[in-house]
Image (cartoon, grey):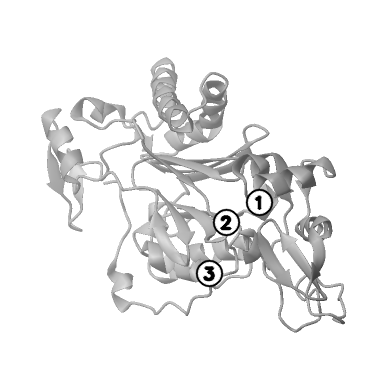
Amino acid sequence: MSAACLVRLARHSGPHVGRSGLLQTALIPFLHQHNGHPLVTICRRQIYVPSGSRHSSTRFDPDSSGHPTTWDSFGIWDNRIDEPILLPPSIRYGKPIPKVSLSKVGCASLIGQRKENEDRFQVSQVTNSILYFAVFDGHGGSEAADFCEKYMKKFIKDFLAEEDDLELVLSKAFLEVDKALAKHLHFYPNVPGINAGTTATVALLRDGIELVVGSVGDSRAMLCRKGKALKLTVDHTPERKDEKERIKKSGGFITWNSLGQPNVNGRLAMTRSIGDFDLKKMGVIAEPETKRVLLHHVHDSFLALTTDGVNFIMNSQEICNVINQCHDPKEAAQRISDQALHYGSEDNSTIIVVPFGAWGKQQSSDTSFSFSRSFVSSGRWA
């Protein structure tokens, strides 16, 4: 849909408009005749309506033709979650952009076989146009994950007041949270978990279309596009050549535990984290790697943020397939965390599922069970 069409609609609507309302309103100004038959033009798209057709009240079969209308015509597919169109961003980008409601987001976190759940997650609205999603996987205690859960959003909001680049905002926020945690532990030296640390994977969604992700550690972000898993993060582990070289140049060393997992100085299975201050001089940094993507709501079904209790037992495409079997994001989040335990994960398992315009469009077959999973441990902190 062109920007001009959306501007006409905006003159008669508020900042949000329902999808069925968009269809009905957009049709009226462009009705004319062609060879004796009514012809409807919707911003360069033409819908042929045979004469004598009887109109129905349902938005899925408006002309009672037996051929349901989908939102693919407008760049959006959504037959399960009916959300309004965000008019100002839609006008700015020249295509309909659906609102992403926090009430529709699915979240789940299970303790697994651990004594306590050191995972933390957060879903909230930072500004009128920016949504915030984050998972933190603590190790050596929950102090670092608790600190990030409490203060990461605050630092992001502060930097948003002076910076428009969301990637830069995330980079600054991660580093400042790390510094603030160091000061906190310095003033409270008797706090348990003085060497605690945490992964951090944070996603910011602006105007329902600009998605920016920042991450340290091995928690992940994944976008489902056309039914395929699109990784938005890369784990920071000693297996990565660039990460291993930085650790060695900083004076650190790599060893392998009994499970064959490489560890920094025999202790930590990741090369970037928030906290872990005893390993900072060994090259373990808090600077995130960031990625920015523009969503295509006709193709993008959801964003999933996961901790390693899920990641180390299910690959990204398996996660994508299981979620695509579910009716809504809340069911999907619960099923993924349950599935991870069923496959043999012993770690805390946390997931956030954020639905986009193509939710429900892709259907996947059942994921087969792998017997070898029962021998896999997702333990990360030695």
Q: Which residue is mark 1?
A: 96
Task: Answer yes or no: is residue 190 visible.
Answer: no
Label 1 to label 2: alpha-carbon separation: 9 Å
Q: Which residue is mark 3?
A: 324
Q: Which residue is mark 2?
A: 297
Q: Which comes sooner in the sequence, label 1 or label 3?
A: 1
Residue at the location (42% across, 65% down)?
228
- Above-or-below relation of 9 to 297: above
Q: Which callout, 1 or 2, points to the residue nearer the camera?
A: 1
Q: Amino acid at mark 1?
A: Pro
**In-front residue for pair 212/26:** 26
Task: Answer yes or no: is residue 375 visible.
Answer: yes
- Binning the other alpha carbons within 10 Å of mark 2 as few (below 14), some (14 to 19) or many (20 upward) gives many
Label 2 to label 3: alpha-carbon separation: 15 Å
Query: x, y percentage for residue 143?
Result: 45, 34
- Above-or-below relation of 62 to 78: below
Query: x, y percentage for residue 212?
Result: 47, 40
